[in-house]
Image (spheres, rainbow, N blue to C red):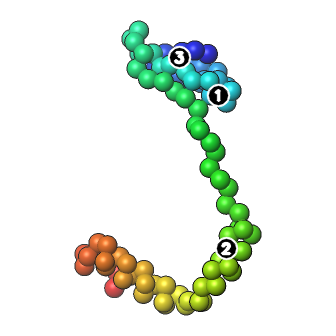
Amino acid sequence: MDYITTTNLRTQSPELIGSLKRGESVSLIHRSKIVGVISPAKEEPKKFDSKRFSKLVKALNLPPTTYAEREKKYREHLMKKYGKGISGR
């Protein structure tokens, strides 16, 4: 599939998806003019690996914090970033 018109986007979407999965770029045509190019995504985002993340956290050897300490640091961050106008306490 080399091109697709704006009116055919709804009816030919399976063909468009197939072309993108094969790595092809598709020109988008509106009123006999090329208005853009639809191209496949470069790469898929990495999936989160909890085991690897836990190894990294253990390697950092961070001190344990309580919920209250985390809340306090978060509030301080919000005050520094946004000022006094935030809702809450």
Crowding at dot 3, Cα within 10 Å, few <14 / some 14-19 / many 20+, comes out as many
From the image, tell me which residue sits under label 2.
Answer: 56
Estimate the spatial distance between the alpha carbons at disc 2 and disc 1, rounded to whole Å: 35 Å
Can you tell which mark lies on residue 4?
3
What's the residue type where badge 2 is placed? Answer: Leu
Q: How many marks?
A: 3
Please indicate whether residue 52 sits to the left or right of residue 11 in the image: right
User: Which comes sooner in the sequence, label 3 or label 2?
Assistant: 3
Residue at the (72%, 74%) spot, across then down: 55
Residue 69, given in percent of the width and then of the height, sits at 48, 90
Estimate the spatial distance between the alpha carbons at disc 3 and disc 2, rounded to whole Å: 47 Å
Residue at the (68%, 80%) spot, across then down: 58
Q: Nearer the viewer, residue 12 or 61?
A: 61
What's the residue type where badge 3 is placed? Answer: Ile
Secondary structure found at label 2:
helix
- When the figure is inspected, residue 79 is found, relative to residue 64, above or below; the finding is above
Please indicate whether residue 35 sits to the left or right of residue 9 in the image: left
> Which quadrant would the N terminus be assigned to in this image?
top right
From the image, tell me which residue sits under label 1.
Answer: 23
Quadrant of residue 35 in the image?
top left
Residue 18, given in percent of the width and then of the height, sits at 67, 25
Q: Residue furthest right?
A: 51
User: Which comes sooner in the sequence, label 1 or label 3?
Assistant: 3
What's the residue type where badge 1 is placed? Answer: Gly
- When the figure is inspected, residue 62 is found, relative to residue 48, above or below; the finding is below
